[in-house]
Image: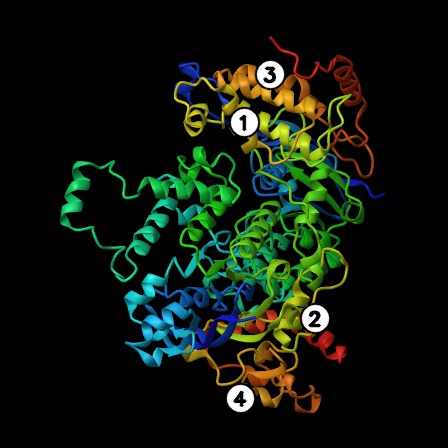
Amino acid sequence: MTDPLVTVDDLEKYYYENDTLLDRLTGAEREAVRAVDGVSFEVREGETLGVVGESGCGKSTLAETLMRLREPTGGSVTFDGDPVFDLSGTDMNAFRRRAQVMFQDPFSSLDPRMTAGEIITEPLAIHGVGTSGERRERAETLLDEVGLSADQIDRYPHEFSGGQRQRIGFARALAIDPEFIVLDEPVSALDVSVQAQVLNLLADMQAERDLTYLFIAHDLSVVRHISDRVAVMYLGEIVEIGPTEEIFEDPKHPYTKALLESVPRADTDERDRTVETIRGDVPSPRNPPSGCSFRTRCPELIQPPGLDLPQATFRGISEFRTRIENGDIDVDLRWEQVGDPDREDREAFVDSLREEAFDTELPDAEEETVSEAIRALADGDRETAAATLRERYRSPCEAIDPGLPAGEHPSACLLNEQPEDVETAREEWEADYEAPEAGASSR
Amino acid sequence: MTDLLRVRDLSTRFFTEEGQINAVENVSFTVEAGSVLGVVGESGSGKSVTGLSLIDLVESPGKITSGEIWYNNADLAERVEGDRPEAVDGDFVDLRRLSEAERRSLRGSAFSMIFQDPMSSFNPSITVGEQIAEAAEVQRRASANPRSTRSRTQGYGLGQMLLDGVLPNRSYTSEESWDRAVELLERVGIPDPAERAEEYPHQFSGGMLQRAMIAQALAGDPDLLVADEPTTALDVTIQAQILDLLADLQETMEMSVVLITHNLGVIARVADRVSVMYAGEVVERGTLRDVFDDPVHPYTKGLLGSVPDIDQPGERLEPIAGNVPDLVDANMPDRCYFADRCPKAMTDCLTRPPEYEVSDGHRARCVLAEREYSEADAVPDERFARATDDGTAANDGSTAADGSIASDAEVSDD
C-alpha cells in the first residue's frame, strides 16, 4: 500500500447562524449548520479518491476546508507530514504550490477580463516562478498539453466553450507542477460528449505526471470511471469508504445501495430493472436526525429487540411517529374533515387518520398501539401520542451514532461491523430497552 | 396504437441581434397515445424550444416559421371543421392553422408543461395550494363555458381591479378548486396535502416542489404532458422518485408524455420512443431499442459512447470531438451539420442529408443508413476549416486532442 499524501482527521466545518454581536448580547443561542461533521480519511499518493454525495451533503465544503480555503472549526489535515492548518509563511506557500484546485463552474471560475495566458500564468507569477517570457512559454506548452492550441493564448474566456474553459482551469491548476489536485465537480456543467473529453484528459495527465486527485462529483458513473477509491458522503459525514470495485459491486451501507440503484442506466434493459426508491428528502443539516443521519430514509431500519415486523410496516409506523413529532398533522383540520365540530366522536377521528396514514392492515398489537396514539392526538395531546409510539417503536438507529471502523472498506451502519465504543453503546441500549405491553396505557 | 400528435417539418427561429438562429429545423416526429417520447440532445440542440413550440409558448424574438402539428381530437375536429376545413384531416386538427385564442384554450386542458427548475417556476409569495388551485380554477371556468375561448381572461376588468384594491385578500379561486388542488397534491404523493397546500414554495424541498409542479400541470387533465428536464435539478434518489411518479401518472391517467432531457439513463428508464436532436434537427428517431441498440447516426453512437457505464467501468471513453455549433443561420454550413465532428464523414456528407428510413419507424438523417462507410470517400479534416473566425478555431483546439483517438476507435469498429 502506498503512503498517504493527505490525511484528514475528524475534520469539522460548522457555519453558525444567529452569531452576530447583537445575537450574543441578547443571548440568542447560535445555531450550527454542520456542513462537514467529523470526517476522517486519507488520500494515497498517486491515487484518485472520489467523493460522492447528493447536493448539500458537504462535499464542496470538505474540499475547500481541506485546502484551507475556509478555516475549519475542528480537526486536522496533514499533507505529506505537515499539519496544513498550522502552516504559515513560506511553509504555507510551499503547500499552496504543491496542492491546487480546479472548480466546477467554467463560467464563473475564470476572470473574464484576463486572457487565457494571464489566467494560466497567474499562479506562476504569484509564486515568482521564471521571467514573464518563460511564464508565457510555459502557458503555451500547457495549452497544448490540455488540448487547446498555443495561438489561443491571447483569447478571453468568453471566446471559449464550456469544455475549453474547463481545460484552461485545469491548465491553471497544473501550472506550478502540483502533486495534489482537488477537482470539485470538474465535468458536471458539461455536456456528455464534452465531459468525456475532459475525463480522458484528466486521466492522461494523471498518468503522465503522477498526480494525486481528490475528485468530487455527484455523478456516480463518472466517479466509478475515474476513481481508485470512493468515499460516500451523507449529511456531512462519510458513511462508507473503500476501493471503487468493492463500493460498486458490494456496497455495505443502505444509503450507498440506494444511491447506486437510483442511477438510471443508459441501456434498453433499464425499463425492466426494479428500483427500490428511497423515500423522502435529505434532512436539513441545521437539524440533523439523532443517531444515524440516514435513519429517516433508511430501507433497512433496525427494530428494537423482540419486535419483528415487516420492514414496510415498521417504516410506516416510524414515519407516522415522525409526522406527529414534527407537528405535521393538523388536528383541527382533521376534526373538520371528520365533520364533528364538538369533537366527541374520537373513534371517527381515529378511523379517519388511521386510514389516511396506513394503506395496509397492521398486526393486532400494532393496531392497538397506533390507535391509542391517535386517541391521544384527538385530545390534542401530541406529546403523549408521540411518547406512546416512541416507547414501543424506537430503533437503535435513532439512539446510537454509528462510526467508521478501521479497515479497507468500512461503513457507518449498525448493520455492519462497528468500532468498539459503538458496539458497547448498542449493547447498553438494548439492555435498557424494555418492550412495553402493546396497548398498555402509558399514563 | 393511435397517434396523438404528428409533427411535420416544424421550424422555430429566433431573430436576434446576432442574426437569425435556427433553433429547431424541419423537425418531424410522432407521439403515440399513452406513450412516452424521449427527446434527447446536448445543450443548444433545440430540444427545449421543440417542447415550447409544441404548446405554442415560444416568445419573441422567437417564432414558429413553418410546420404542422396535427393533434388527434375528434371533438375539436368536429368543432373546427365548419370554419376551417383545411385545418382538419379526419380526427386530426392542425394546431398551426387554428387561431391564437383556440390554441390558448387547448393549453392546460389538452397540453401541459413542466419545467426544469421548480424553484423559479413558482411564485414565491403565493402559497403552493393557491397556485395549483388557480390552474384548476382556470380549467373549471373554461369547462363551465366551453364555447368561449375568452372565458379565462374574462371577468377581470376595471371593476375587478378596484375591488381587488379594496379587498386584497379576496381570492380568485373557489373552494372547489382548492379542494381539487389538495386532491392533486395527494395524487402526486405529497404527505399531509391539506397542510402542505397552505405552505409557500420556499417551505418545500426541490423534489416536493417538482411534485407540486406536476400537480399543477395535471389540473386540466391534459392529453399530453411536456416535461422539460424534469429531474435535472434533482439528486439521483429524488430523480428516481419523480421518474416513478411520472411513469405511474402516465399509465393511470392515460396521457402521453414528451420527456426532454440530456440524460440517456432517464430516457432508457421511461421512454418508449426516442428522438435524438443535434443542432436543431432530429438526427435519429425510432423505438428505444432501435436507437440504443442499433444506432445508425454517428452522433447517436458518439453520445452513447460518451457516457461512462456505471456497471462496466474502466474502458476509455470515446467522446465526440469538437463542440456543438452555435446555430446562427449565417454560420450553418450547407452540408450535414455533424460532418465536421463526424469520424465517418464522406464526400456524400457535403450536401444536406435527407431523413433516411432504416427500418419501419426508425429513421436517421445520415447517409450511413443507405451505404457503408468507405475510406476512399473520406473527407480530409482540413476540408472543414471554416473562414469564420470565432467558433472554428476554438473547435480545432479540442479536435487536436481527442479527435484522433475517437476517430481511430470508430474506424477500427467496422
Q: What's the distance in space between the residues labelled 1 and 4, CA to CA?
A: 72 Å
First in sequence, mark 2 or 4: give its number: 2
Residue labelled with disc 2: B293
Residue labelled with disc 4: B351
Query: Badge 1: few (under 14), some or many (20 or more) residues near its Cα, within 10 Å?
Result: some
- Amino acid type, mark 4: Thr
Query: Badge 3: few (under 14), some or many (20 or more) residues near its Cα, within 10 Å?
Result: some
Q: Position of residue A191 (x, y in %)?
A: 57, 62
Q: Position of residue A373 (x, y in %)?
A: 58, 19
- Image colouring: rainbow
Residue A351: mark: 1
Residue A245 showing in the rendered view: yes
Left or right: residue A264 versus residue B208 is right
The nearer-to-camera label among 2 and 4 is 2
Q: What's the distance in space between the residues labelled 1 and 3, CA to CA?
A: 20 Å
Q: Give SS at disc 4.
A: loop
Q: What's the distance in space between the residues labelled 2 and 4, CA to CA?
A: 28 Å
